[in-house]
Structure formats: structure tokens, C-alpha cells
Image (cartoon, coloured by chain):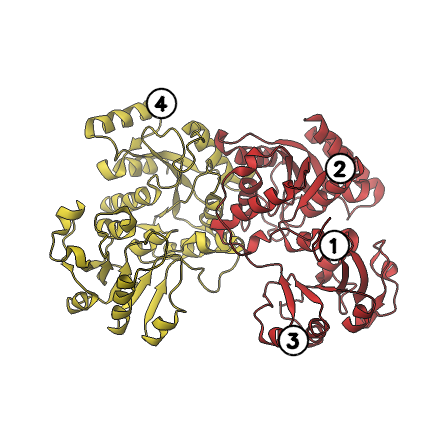
Chain colours: A red, B yellow
Amino acid sequence: MNASPLGEGAKVAILMQGYLRNHFGKLGFGMLRYSPADIVAVVDGENAGGDLRALTGIPRCAPIVRSCSEARDLGAETLVLGVAPPGGRLPQDWWDEVLAALRLGMLVVNPLHSPLAANEEVRRAGGRVWDVRVEPPDLDTASGRALGLSCARVLTVGTDMAVGKMTASLEMAFAARRMDIAAEFVATGQTGICIWGSGVAVDAVRLDFAPGAVERETLRASESGAEVLFVEGQGAINHPAASAVLAIMRGCMATHLVLCTRAEQRSLWRFPDLPVPPLQSLIETYETMAAGGGAFPRPKTIGIALDTHELDEPEALQAIERLEREVGLPVVDPVRQGAARLIQAFLQTR
Amino acid sequence: MNASPLGEGAKVAILMQGYLRNHFGKLGFGMLRYSPADIVAVVDGENAGGDLRALTGIPRCAPIVRSCSEARDLGAETLVLGVAPPGGRLPQDWWDEVLAALRLGMLVVNPLHSPLAANEEVRRAGGRVWDVRVEPPDLDTASGRALGLSCARVLTVGTDMAVGKMTASLEMAFAARRMDIAAEFVATGQTGICIWGSGVAVDAVRLDFAPGAVERETLRASESGAEVLFVEGQGAINHPAASAVLAIMRGCMATHLVLCTRAEQRSLWRFPDLPVPPLQSLIETYETMAAGGGAFPRPKTIGIALDTHELDEPEALQAIERLEREVGLPVVDPVRQGAARLIQAFLQTR
């Protein structure tokens, strides 16, 4: 079905080079947790031979190998850079592995800020590269065509960066599929793209074309005949550096919203002086923006995805219950509980 | 004061090459109407020797000459491409004039989509080029620092593209200055940049950096000691292809809004099936977005700028009066009437 080099059945290796226990490897961890691809190996010289489940806590079995050459021997056809190095420049030993993979004929998927395709050494290695975090070619401005789609578009919106918008969207897509609902995911960031095998990194697209880029992915995802698209949100309306949410809203013309937040979040992570406004007020703002003053149908917020990973189980359940009483909407931690309740809430709106 | 090659006292020629009577020349017309620079010549072979005021209706005196060489002889140091050719590619005779200007040592200001600086012929001509419509270097994400500014930030927002947002912002800046208020303009599009001599074309900036780009221009403009900055808005919240308004709101952290619309506008220009929502509803939406659900101070809408250029004078005045009764805010056509009433309304909010 999915012909993407990162889709179902694809043979993938992830380069984690010494970062199997570090948050710089968050893209690799996301793939280990959620990728439908066949992850045939993790390349990490430091941890080669180790137990992936024990090291990461993620229930995925794959051998940890020393080099791309070993990964290739195991059948890997694609190498994904699973780590974003601090500072952004690839250390020499990572770079050596990338070149080795290219010379072995592997496709290298690069989610880092700096594109590799134009690199001289990459070209000399005769390599094939997919730079995920660049503006795709042949974009156009948006047309509003998503308004005419028969499938629902459920967009995650947030109270901050990194409060689980991608995770909630993925968990909802999986939960919907388990309930026999034809669901697709629309990735708008590099990790989502690597997990799903398609999408667009909106942050790398010129503002003029950003809604059009999301629209293109939305229309493409709808062509599978999905009943519902789960669109990965970005940023937050209460964040001074974030403005992607409007481009995504216009591109997908959301019919439903899910608000994502962190349990007991008082202020923005990078702006501790900026308190997070009341969730009811954020919900109102997101719905109002999406409706464009009445130009477009106003989406309905179906519930809240609460990231409780910093709490233990009883605390988490208490926090969920408290918030549910407070806001009067279904609240779940999609990682702890799955997203079935959000899908049920969605179905009740139809 | 203004060291820009397009600022006060700068010696500028505008290339209009056969387009002195055509809307493709709208950037050149904008400069003729509003530029503080000394426009020493308009280059237009077809209309050379003609009367600029008679041809354009704009009260600016400048000779129309045949070539950049003649403009150079008149003292021009900078050539601005005043026309956007249909299709986007420069016709050969325009291109010849550009190369001639570069060889004469003139700076060429290029507001077109395609950058010229990297062009091989331009480099061989040893030319200096300012590509206005590209992402500036060394951008960062926004920091919210505009929140701490002591000057007001008045942002124009709209009911559509091309409803006079730039014009209203400029007219307000001029009206404020005439009332001895220290005012600056912050340009966010190519015409505004060419008129004011600084600014950023947000549509060409990657989404991640767009609020930061506007923030940088806002902070820079505030350094003059201005009491108020008039920030040029873009797009419209009710337009399916537009999303720049949020990036601009976050970059400048608007304290006041002015809604711009066209008299009797029923629907979007490029989307005739999309009716324009009630203005009250658009105002509410813009203010709500700017406030970010309560994270930032809610801006106050001080009035409406109404583009009445399609109406005759009595019709225009009737339309203004009617709208003022309907919305309960001051309404002016800034081109017909000047923007003094909007500035008075602004002063009453202080």
C-alpha cells in the first residue's frame, strides 16, 4: 500500500550513534515507538550488541549493530538519522557512517536543518538523500479545497511546543484504525514525516506557501478514501515564537480540534514568565481563528490530550479526572490510556 | 538620518519600461506616491519625454527618460524595478537596462520573486543588487521582546488581500508625523520596503523564522525613539491562502489594530464564492488571535480604513458614513481624507 521508503514493510536502519540514552535522539525514539516500517537495525557503536528494549524502554525488538555495513547485511535499504546533534553539525563518526550508507546504495533520510543533497561529498558518494526538512518543490498557495473534502480533519493544537501534539495525532490514528475507521495521519514536522513516511515540515516552508503545502498533504492523504485525517499541529497560539497553527488550519480546514497540554503546566517551557492561559480560553481562541470570523465552519473541540509522563500512575489518573471536571470535555493521556475515548467523542459529533 | 538607498534624500530611478499605464507597475506607482527618496527619473522608453503627472495622476515631478544611462546622468544612484512582469520573467529589454545600470555602478533593487544576486550575468557585470523578496540572513525565532517596547504598535488587518493595508499604514505614519508624533513604519512586503527603505518581505521567510523577522524589524524601528510604529499587515483571516497575519502579530505584538476593507465588498477578490464575514466578527477574531487566549494584552481596534477608490466622491462619503453608523468606529478613506481621524482615535486610547 505505502510505497514510502519509511512506510509499512520498508527495511529501515536508524543511526543513533552513542545517543540511545539521550533526548537528542528523540526522532529515533519516535520511530522506534511508532514507525510501521520494519526497523531491521539500530546503528550505535557504543551500545552494539545491547538490548534495545532494556536501553530505551520501548517495546520494539531490533538488533543494535556497530555500523551501517552490518545494518545493510541485515537487509536495511534506508538509513534515518535518528539524532539531532547539539549544535546541528554532524560529528565526524556520524558523517562517516552516512557516507558508508550512501556508498552501500542505501537511501539516507535526513531530518536535520541542513540539507545534504547538495553536499559535495554526498554527490561524490553517488548517494540518494531525502532531506525531510526543506521546502518541497512546486508548491502553490492554498485554494481552500480542503473545505470540500468529505473526510473529517482532526487537528491537534497546544498550550506550548512539545506537549504531545504529534503523539496524540498518531495515537488517535491508531485508535481509529483499531475501531475499523479508515484513518490517515498528516505529518507537519520532521519526526512525524519519518514515522509516517510522508508529510511536510511546515517550519521550513516560506510563509506564502505554507498553507498550500499543508493543503497538498491533506488532499493527498484524503485520496486513500480515509474517513478521518489526523493532522499534526505545531506551536501554540500563546507562544511568542510560534505562528504555524494558522497556516495548518488554512491548509487542512480543520473540522475538529484536540487540545494538547502537559499536566500541571503553569507556564511555557522556554518562557517561564509567560503563564499558560486558562484552557477554556485557548480552546475558544483556536476555534475562533479556525472559523476566520465566520468565513469557514467553526471546528468542534472534541477533547484534551494530557501529557502526564512526569507523574506516577495514581497522580496521572487524578490529574486527568480533575481536568475533565474543570473543562467538561473528555481528557486522556493517549500514551498511558490510548486515544479510544477521543475517537468515541469524535464519533458522537458526526 | 535614513542611510537606506531608498530613504530620504537617496537618488533613485524607477524602471517602468512601457508600463506607466498598467497595474503591473503598482510598486513603481506606490513609490511615486509615497517614497521619501528623491526620484530623479523614471525610465520608460515608450513614454520618454512625457508628463509623469498627466500619465499617472500622481502629484510627483520627475522626468521620464529613455535609459538608465540618462537616469545616471541625472544623478540616480539606485534603480528600482517598478514593474512585476506578467509571468515573472524579465523581458529582454528590461534585462538590458538592468545590466546597463549595474555596469554604471548603480545599486539595483529587485522586488521580484526571483533573486538576482546569484545570477551569472549580474555577477559578471560586477553589480550590486538588493533582492528585497528573499529571506534575510541570520534570522532567529521570535522572543516576544516587542511586548516590552514602550512605543505603540498599530497593525493593519484586512478583509482580503489588496484592500489598502500598506496604504493605510503609510498614511497613518504621515498623519502622525504631521501631528508631531514620532512615528515609524514597519514594512512587511516588497512595495512597503521599497517605499520606506527597510523592512522584511515576510512571505519569503520560512515559517519558523517569520515572527522573528518581523520582531527584528519592529525592534529596529523602535530604536529611532518612535512613540508609535505603524506595522504593515498582510493577508486576511478569512482568506484560505493567507496566514501571515499571525506571524506579524507575534513579531510586533500589536497594541492597536486598524481594519482595512473595500467599500461595498461582498466577497473575496480571488474567491468570489467566499463572502466577507461581518466586520464586527472579523474585528473580534483579530483581537482574540492577537491576545493568544489571554497570554498577551488584547489590542484595541481604533477604526476602519475604507478603500473607496471605485466610488465617486458623494458615494464615497455616503459609504463612509453608513459604515461608521454600522460598526460604531471611526471610518476614513486614508487616500481621500488622510488618516488624521484614525490618529486622533489612537490618541484617545492612550
Q: Mark 3 or mark 2, which is nearer to you?
A: 3
Cα separation, mark 3 vs mark 2, equals 43 Å
The residue carrying mark 3 is A125
Q: Where is residue A274 in the image (x, y as percent from the top left)?
A: 58, 46
Q: Residue at x 52, y 42 (%)?
A: B296
The reply, left or right, for residue A125 in relation to residue B123 is: right
Q: In this view, does A122 lie above or below B233?
A: below
Cα separation, mark 4 vs mark 3, equals 68 Å
Cα separation, mark 2 vs mark 4, equals 48 Å
Q: Mark 2 is on which residue type?
A: Ala
Cα separation, mark 3 vs mark 1, equals 29 Å
Q: Where is residue A335 in the image (x, y as percent from the top left)?
A: 78, 45
Q: Are marks 2 and 4 in contact (CB under 8 Å)?
A: no
Q: Where is residue A339 in the image (x, y as percent from the top left)?
A: 76, 38
Q: Are dots 4 and 1 on a single chain?
A: no
Q: Mark 3 is on which residue type?
A: Ala
The residue carrying mark 1 is A30
Which element type, helix, strand or loop, lies under badge 1?
helix
Q: Is residue A73 above or below residue A199?
A: below
Task: Say whether disc 3 or disc 1 marks the residue closer to the N-terminus.
Answer: 1
Q: Are dots 4 and 3 on a single chain?
A: no
The residue carrying mark 2 is A176
Q: Crowdedness of circle 1 by 10 Å Cα count: few (<14), some, many (20+)? A: some
Mark 4 chain: B
The reply, left or right, for residue A244 in relation to residue A16 is: left
Which element type, helix, strand or loop, lies under badge 3?
loop
